[in-house]
Amino acid sequence: MRCRKVFAVVLCLMITAAFSKVGYAGEAGEESAPEEHLYVPILMYHHFIKEELPKGNYGASITMAKFDEDMRYLEYNKYTPLLPQDLKAIREGKMKMPKKPIIITIDDGYESAYTIAYPVLKERGMKATVFAIVGSVENPRKSEIKKLNWKQMREMYESGVFDIQSHSYNLHNQDLNGQYKKFQVNGIQKGLIECRAQYNLRVEQDIVKSIELIEENVGNEVNCFSYPYGVYEEWGKDILEKNGVLFGFGTRYGAGDFKGNLYYLNRFSVGMNTDLSGLLEQ
């Protein structure tokens, strides 16, 4: 009888110990597996205009009022804007990812980033990264929407509000008016009969030139690259890594995964009809 009681007590203690080790969903156990993904929303803007267009045909442009509305939302909801140097520090373990991170990017380097976006960002306490097409800075075309110049970009960088990064030197099909064309070489996409040596010569020369000119004329370190047309190429990744680029930004819709392929981070394209609150709360 006494042996039965002892056995029952021991069995009870064993069951209790076993259940005490059970973890519940949402609990951070000591031995919990590391997260497989670290998603961060990355917003992609292009051109800004002061007033609404009569017919509402905005393309990749948004009004100053819409941009201010977006930045007010981020400010009110206490999002922390991250610049490329922050991303590098996080990657190196020198800085922790904030609770509500946001990355604001502006592609192509239109002058409206200086005349319209810049004052809005300063007022709202936000920061953004401009991906400049460096060839358009060096050799502006009258037929294009006016681009930023080096003086403006240096001021923007020195203010702490902006960082200037590469969108290539001249990989945007200038001879085709900047349009993406099927069965053509677009951005860093390799040609159908292009060998590795030809590819490296064409793409690496362009990327290195863009990096050197930005660092020389603006003063910031270039460690990010925005793919022309969002085209990703494995050969191009090798060139970027070789030349100090740590992060590649694409155009595929979605949040960037900082535990995934850092050389192709998804972004949310923002237009006039984008509901930022709905996008960030999904």
Image: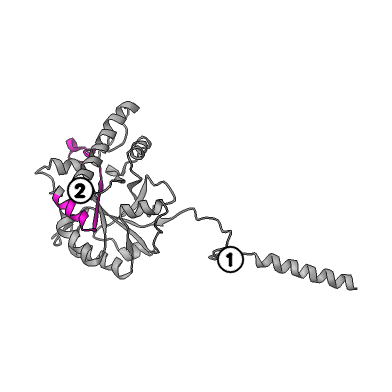
Mark 2 is surrounded, within 10 Å at the Cα level, by few (under 14), some (14 to 19) or many (20 or more) other residues, namely many
Residue at 32% in and 26% down: 197
Residue at position x 46%, y 54% in the image: 37
Residue sitting nearer the eye, 54 or 222 = 222
Quarter the C terminus occupies: bottom left
Answer left or right for 21 relative to 80. right
In the rendered image, which residue does mark 1 sit on? 24
Compared to 7, does 177 lie above or below?
A: above
Q: Quadrant of residue 188?
A: top left
Q: Which mark is residue 218?
A: 2
Residue 52 drawn at (x, y percent)? 15, 62
Q: Nearer the viewer, mark 2 or mark 1?
A: 2
Q: Please report the bounds of the magenta region as a residue range.
A: 151-178
> What residue appears at the point 57 percent right and 63 percent down from the top-left corner?
29
Q: Amino acid at mark 2?
A: Val
Looking at the rendered structure, the kind of residue marked 1 is Tyr
* Residue 277, image x, y percentages: 33, 66
Q: Is residue 162 magenta?
A: yes
- Residue 251 located within the stretch drawn in magenta: no
**Quadrant hosting residue 122:** bottom left
